């Protein structure tokens, strides 16, 4: 059984090799992937975030922890996404223009892939042209992630851009709320990766 505290600690110390060893062993043992994410990875990022807010940790420490988390997520991704079944729909996801935070977006992306969605991951700093290109490839839903209060207003531009079309715009990220979603007229909000899957399910009536 994986020691999720050891995983959390390895992420907090930015020890990518340790993360790789722990996650690889868990994969080998066919352990529950969600447990690693929910009890090891997300708590690690929450803790470093709290320390950053209190001035007890700084940007370089955030970066090394984020890279260590990405190492683990990269190993888990094919496992979660592996599925021979017909995809339930196509979702484009990206962190909005001006914003480079991608850990939460990557989690949502992985969870959607794991739930049998075809996901076009547009990365970070996405402008309308990038979202449009994904829609041209058949994306039915555009999922926007924002971690900065300064980049949240771009979500309104996305919602306005697709209003009146068949494309649904959904939003999320730490500073985003249901109230903000209502205010900008987006089609849905979710607070975490799991509820993002439920939201997409409901919008596509799966
Ligand atoms: Co930055 N950062 N950061 N950062 N960073 C925050 C967001 C901040 C709150 C820290 C703080 O001050 N306490 C603060 C924003 C303040 C504000 O806007 N009011 C901040 C700042 C200021 C900055 C810089 C400006 C710092 C600087 O340079 N002076 C800079 C901005 C760069 C830019 O984007 N242009 C910056 C840079 C960075 C790093 C590069 C060092 C690194 C990012 C690395 C990376 O992403 N590859 C980083 C990090 C790691 C953080 C914190 C500590 C952690 C973010 C994170 O990964 N959380 C963050 C503090 C915090 O949030 N407590 C902070 C874990 C992740 C799993 O959660 O992304 O919320 P989250 O995703 C969740 C949900 O929100 C939801 O599901 C996810 C999983 O359940 N969700 C969605 C997310 N997207 C969704 C989309 C959906 C649905 C749900 O679509 C429908």
Image (cartoon, rainbow, N blue to C red):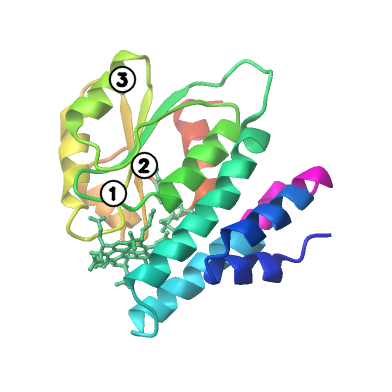
Q: Which residue is mark 2?
A: 188
Give the quarter of the figure containing the C terminus: top right
Q: Which mark is residue 181?
A: 1
| Figure quarter occupied by ligand 1 | bottom left
Q: Which residue is mark 3?
A: 135
Q: Is residue 7 above or below residue 105?
A: below
Mark 2 or mark 3, which has the lower sequence index? Answer: 3
Side of 100 relative to 26 (left or right) = left
Side of 136 relative to 4 (left or right) = left
| Numbered range of the magenta stretch | 27-38
Confirm or reject: label 2 Cβ below 8 Å from ligand 1: yes
> Spatial distance from mark 3 to mark 1, Cα to Cα?
21 Å
> Spatial distance from mark 1 to mark 2, Cα to Cα?
7 Å
Q: Quadrant of residue 148?
A: bottom left
> Spatial distance from mark 2 to mark 3, Cα to Cα?
18 Å
* Local crowd size for mark 1, using a 10 Å CA cut-off: few (<14), some (14–19), many (≥20): many
> Seen from this angle, which residue lies furthest front?
17
Q: Is residue 112 above or below residue 107?
A: above
Residue nearest the observer in this picture, 63 or 122: 63
Q: Residue at x 62, y 15 (%)?
A: 86
Which SS type dominates the magenta stretch? helix
Side of 205 relative to 129 (left or right) = right
């Amino acid at each position: 059984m994986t020691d999720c505290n050891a995983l959390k600690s390895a992420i907090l110390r930015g020890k990518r090799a340790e993360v790789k060893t722990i996650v690889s062993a868990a994969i080998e043992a066919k352990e529950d992937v969600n447990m690693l994410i929910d009890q090891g990875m997300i708590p690690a990022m929450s803790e470093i975030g709290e320390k950053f807010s209190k001035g007890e940790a700084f940007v370089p420490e955030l970066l090394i922890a984020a890279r260590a988390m990405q190492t683990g997520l990269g190993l888990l991704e094919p496992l979660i996404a592996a599925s021979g079944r017909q995809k339930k729909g196509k979702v484009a996801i990206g962190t909005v223009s001006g914003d480079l935070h991608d850990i939460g977006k990557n989690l949502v992306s992985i969870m959607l892939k794991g739930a049998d969605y075809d996901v076009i991951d547009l990365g970070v700093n996405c402008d309308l042209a990038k979202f449009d290109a994904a829609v041209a490839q058949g994306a039915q839903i555009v999922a926007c992630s924002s971690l900065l209060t300064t980049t949240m207003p771009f979500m309104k531009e996305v919602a306005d851009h697709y209003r009146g079309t068949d494309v649904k715009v959904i939003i999320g990220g730490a500073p985003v709320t249901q109230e903000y979603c209502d205010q900008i007229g987006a089609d849905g909000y979710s607070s975490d990766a799991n509820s993002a899957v439920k939201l997409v399910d409901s919008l596509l009536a799966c």
